[in-house]
Image (cartoon, rainbow, N blue to C red):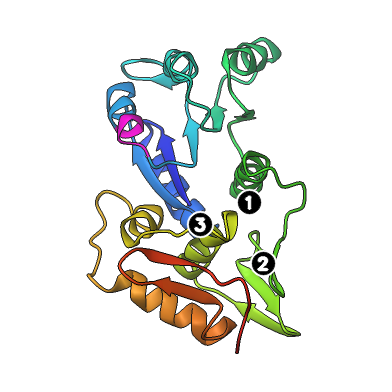
Amino acid sequence: MRVLIVEDDPVLMNGLVVGLKIGGFSPEAVASLSDARIAIEAGGFLAIVLDIGLPDGSGLDLLHGIRRNGDTCPVLLLTARDQVADRIAGLDTGADDYMGKPFDLAELSARLRALLRRGEGRARSSIEWNGLVAFPDTMSGEHQGKAIKFSVREFALLQYLLERPGTIRSKAELEERLYGWNEEIESNAVEVHIHKLRGKLGARFIETVRGVGYRLALENGS
């Protein structure tokens, strides 16, 4: 679950990256509006965590531009400007949520999951498919009466497939979902994660469509 962090404080930026990774996200961080615009233009982010006070301008200007261009990517403003008037201005500009500094990383992760859940049209926090109940908040699941724990990338890949079970996801799509710009991707990384998921969910839970990609099978097998 790729998330863009726009924050110029290096200590806070690093803390956000580490904390969101623990929370199951794949965060990428930039420190300026100019770099944020480049990152957003490249695409692939499911949500943006945006500071307002940045060295080359206001995060609200970036937010205004995002919404003017018709981009509906969820934006959570994370800022020291936490007066009522600031929150109103941020929400009216197009933010989906607003948190003041200091903040709790666990709450930030929960708010991001809620934004993504609403974007997918889900009211419940769990995701159910073909005998599997998946829990994004703990990166765990229950399948055929068995409790299962997933690694961060295993769950990110599984959740991507669960968003649209009948849709075939290419290897390139899955790599984009799992890895950031600066992360080196081994040639067989996706295949390794698929293999591990099949070991936990059954060999036929994820179907390979040769030459195209992967999707969740309509009928599960062991």
Residue 41: x and y in percent read: 32, 29
N-terminal of the two: label 3 or label 2? 2
Majority secondary structure of the magenta segment? helix
Taking the spot 55% from the left edge, 33% from the top edge, the residue there is 74
Q: Quadrant of residue 83?
A: top right
- Check if residue 41 falls in the magenta segment: yes
Taking the spot 47% from the left edge, 13% from the top edge, the residue there is 68
N-terminal of the two: label 3 or label 1? 1
Question: Crowding near pointer 1: few (<14 within 10 Å), some, many (20+)?
Answer: some
Q: Is residue 161 left or right of residue 88?
A: left
Which residue is nearer to you in this view: 203 or 175? 203
Q: Is residue 188 above or below residue 5?
A: below
N-terminal of the two: label 2 or label 1? 1
Between marks 3 and 2 in the image, the one whose residue lies nearer the viewer: 3
Say which quadrant the C terminus sits in. bottom right
Q: Which mark is residue 106?
A: 1
Which residue is nearer to you in this view: 96 or 73? 73
Disc 2 on helix, strand or loop? strand
Q: Which residue is mark 3?
A: 167
Separation of disc 3 and disc 2 at Cα? Answer: 18 Å
Which residue is nearer to you in this view: 194 or 78? 194
Q: Are marks 2 and 1 in contact (CB under 8 Å)?
A: no
Amino acid under disc 1? Ala
Q: Which mark is residue 220?
A: none
Residue 169: x and y in percent read: 42, 58
Residue 124: x and y in percent read: 77, 52
Between marks 3 and 1 in the image, the one whose residue lies nearer the viewer: 3
Amino acid under disc 3? Thr
Separation of disc 3 and disc 1 at Cα? Answer: 31 Å
Amino acid under disc 2? Ala
Residues drawn in magenta: 39-43
